[in-house]
Image: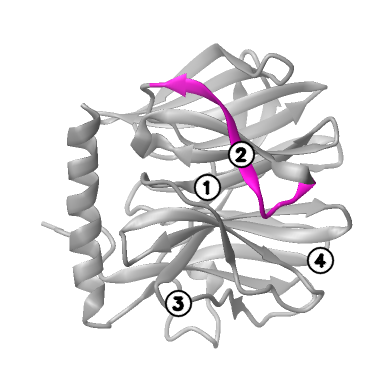
């Protein structure tokens, strides 16, 4: 029986230019590892939002890094709460910048707005849903309508929830829930359009968490209908800069210039086991306190 799902490994974010093959790791303070990369162009600059997992306190923060044309800057923590935060999905509405981070550990779905249009300063403006454990909520603009795709694990079942997002009232309205018995519907990054067709990356978690990524074609919303197009296994992301092939991947981001993924890589340092233990104990305590 596996006691630790991470197998003494840590996540990190890697990127490369589309014209290159060499991967570069996002570098930050040693107390953090990084995951869930979300790219966003804003006011003529390119930003990379990420989960920054604080190994000292065993909790996820939200960080942002700036692209200078060659490298990403050292990530800066921009949102810090007592509960775990990850998957900082950033989107625009009426020339303002919003974020829908994962706050499932707090049993909430929260929306933030950038203060003074700065990607480095954020304020929570509303709790869209309470007493819910949604993971990796992703906003999709489809035929002029804002939707949210959110994921939930419920005792052996996996649920993909579809919501209408009313940005004027800051409200969500439930449209549909798709129940699956295999863990392959969790969002893995921003949707993208090719030749008028919308695609979404989802996590392939059937064997291990972060085992790879599936690309689905979105056929419609309400009802929500998709077609599986392609599997991207974690072993695709092999690189000379890694000690071995990536053990896992579960979020991707790209544009015309760069390609960004998170990778689970082996970490044999003696403190890695301690980090895993502390994180799991803290998660159990937090759940008990919430209930």
Find the distance from the CA under tag 1 to the CA under tag 4.
22 Å
* Residue found 54% across the figure and 71% down from its top: 237
Q: Which residue is mark 3?
A: 245
Q: In front: 191, or 131?
A: 131
Q: Earlier in the sequence, mark 2 or mark 4?
A: 2
Which of discs 2 and 4 lies nearer the camera? The answer is 2
Would residue 11 be found to the left or right of residue 156 on screen?
right
Q: Main secondary structure of the magenta part?
A: strand
Q: Secondary structure at mark 2?
A: strand
Q: Quadrant of residue 72?
A: bottom right
Which of discs 4 and 3 lies nearer the camera? The answer is 4
* Residue found 66% across the figure and 56% down from its top: 253
Is the C-beta separation of discs 3 and 1 under 8 Å?
A: no
Q: Which residue is mark 1?
A: 87
**Residue 238 to residue 33: above or below:** below
Mark 2 Cα-neighbour bin, 10 Å: few <14, some 14–19, many ≥20: few
Q: Earlier in the sequence, mark 1 or mark 2?
A: 1
Q: Determine if the magenta segment contains residue 121.
A: yes
Q: Secondary structure at mark 4?
A: loop
Is any atom of residue 264 visible in this view?
A: no
Q: Quadrant of residue 132?
A: top left
Q: Earlier in the sequence, mark 1 or mark 4?
A: 1
Find the distance from the CA under tag 4 to the CA under tag 3.
24 Å
Find the distance from the CA under tag 1 to the CA under tag 2.
17 Å
Mark 1 Cα-neighbour bin, 10 Å: few <14, some 14–19, many ≥20: many
**Residue 272 to residue 156: above or below:** below
For the record, the magenta segment spans: 117-130
Identify the image quadrant of the C terminus: top left
Which of discs 1 and 4 lies nearer the camera? The answer is 1
Q: Earlier in the sequence, mark 4 or mark 3?
A: 3
* Residue found 41% across the figure and 54% down from its top: 60
Q: Which residue is mark 2?
A: 123
């Amino acid at each position: 029986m596996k006691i630790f799902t991470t197998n003494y490994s840590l996540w990190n974010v890697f990127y490369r230019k589309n014209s290159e093959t060499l991967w570069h790791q996002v570098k930050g303070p040693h107390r953090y590892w990084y995951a869930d990369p979300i790219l966003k162009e804003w006011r003529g600059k390119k930003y990379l939002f990420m989960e920054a997992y604080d190994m000292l306190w065993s909790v996820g923060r939200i960080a942002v890094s700036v692209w200078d044309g060659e490298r990403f800057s050292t990530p800066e923590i921009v949102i810090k709460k007592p509960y775990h935060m990850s998957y900082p999905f950033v989107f625009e509405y009426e020339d303002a910048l919003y974020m829908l981070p994962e706050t499932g550990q707090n049993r909430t779905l929260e929306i933030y707005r950038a203060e003074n249009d700065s990607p480095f300063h954020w304020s929570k403006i509303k709790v869209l849903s309470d007493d819910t454990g949604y993971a990796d909520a992703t906003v999709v603009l489809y035929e002029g309508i804002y939707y949210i795709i959110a994921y939930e694990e419920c005792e052996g079942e996996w649920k993909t929830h579809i919501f209408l997002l009313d940005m004027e009232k800051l409200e969500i309205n439930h449209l549909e829930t798709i129940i699956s018995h295999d863990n392959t519907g969790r969002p893995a990054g921003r949707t993208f359009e090719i030749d008028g067709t919308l695609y979404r990356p989802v996590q392939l978690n059937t064997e291990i968490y972060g085992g790879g990524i599936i690309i689905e074609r979105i056929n419609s919303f309400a009802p929500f209908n998709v077609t599986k197009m392609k599997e991207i296994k974690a072993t695709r992301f092999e690189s000379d800069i890694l000690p071995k092939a990536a053990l896992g991947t579960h979020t991707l981001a790209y544009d015309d210039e760069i390609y960004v993924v998170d990778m689970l890589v082996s970490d044999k340092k003696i403190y890695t086991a301690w980090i895993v233990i502390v994180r799991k104990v803290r998660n159990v305590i937090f759940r008990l306190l919430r209930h």
